Image (cartoon, grey):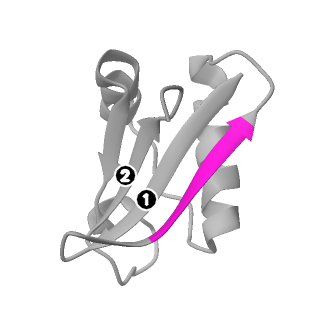
Amino acid sequence: MIRIWAKIVKEEKILKDIIFEKFCNFEIDNFYDCISEICHKLDISTPVVLSKHIFHYINFNTTIFYPQDFPEEVNFDKFVIEEASNY
């Protein structure tokens, strides 16, 4: 089971957050699909997922997407994805 805490942050304040759960094992191939589903639920565009994002999530259980990672203009400072297994 995948549990991800996703937060939209502006000026160090959480504007929106969700706990995303999916009944499957984490694999690199489905990371983009999870991010896309999370973004749909938060009503934001899906960012470009680079190898650095996957690397940080696998090694540090968190990754950050900044406005320049999105194809459309966004009105927040960062989009943070964290493993939520301990929450």
Mark before the other along the chain sequence, 1 or 2: 1
How far apart are the two marked residues, 1 and 2, measured between alpha carbons? Answer: 5 Å
Does dot 1 land on a helix, a strand or a loop? strand
Q: Position of residue 31 (x, y in %)?
A: 59, 32
Residue 23 falls left or right of residue 7: right
Out of 9 and 32, give the one closest to the viewer: 9
The residue wearing badge 2 is 80
The quarter holding residue 54 reads: top left
Q: Residue furthest front?
A: 87
Please tell me which residue is depicted at 77% across the width and 21% down the height of the picture. Answer: 24
Question: Picture coordinates of residue 50 (x, y %)?
Answer: 39, 38
Disc 2, SS: strand
* Magenta span includes 11: no
In this view, 26 is above or below 62: above
Answer above or below: position of 34 versus 16.
above
Q: Is residue 78 above or below residue 51?
A: below
Q: Which residues are magenta?
A: 16-21
Residue occupying image coordinates x 64% and y 22%: 29
| Residue identifier under label 1 | 7
For residue 61, which quarter of the picture? top left
Q: Quadrant of residue 1?
A: top right
Which residue sits at x=56%, y=20%?
A: 28
Amino acid found under the numbered disc labelled 2: Val
Residue 3's x, y, as percent?
61, 33
Q: For residue 18: magenta?
A: yes
Q: Residues within 10 Å of mark 1 (few under 14, many from 20)?
A: many
Residue contact between numbered discs 1 and 2, judged by CB atoms under 8 Å: yes
Which of 23/58 is in front? Answer: 23
Count numbered badges in the picture.
2
* Label 2 crowd bin: few (<14), some (14–19), many (20+), radius 10 Å: some
Tell me residue 13's x, y (percent). Answer: 27, 73
Mark 1 residue type: Lys
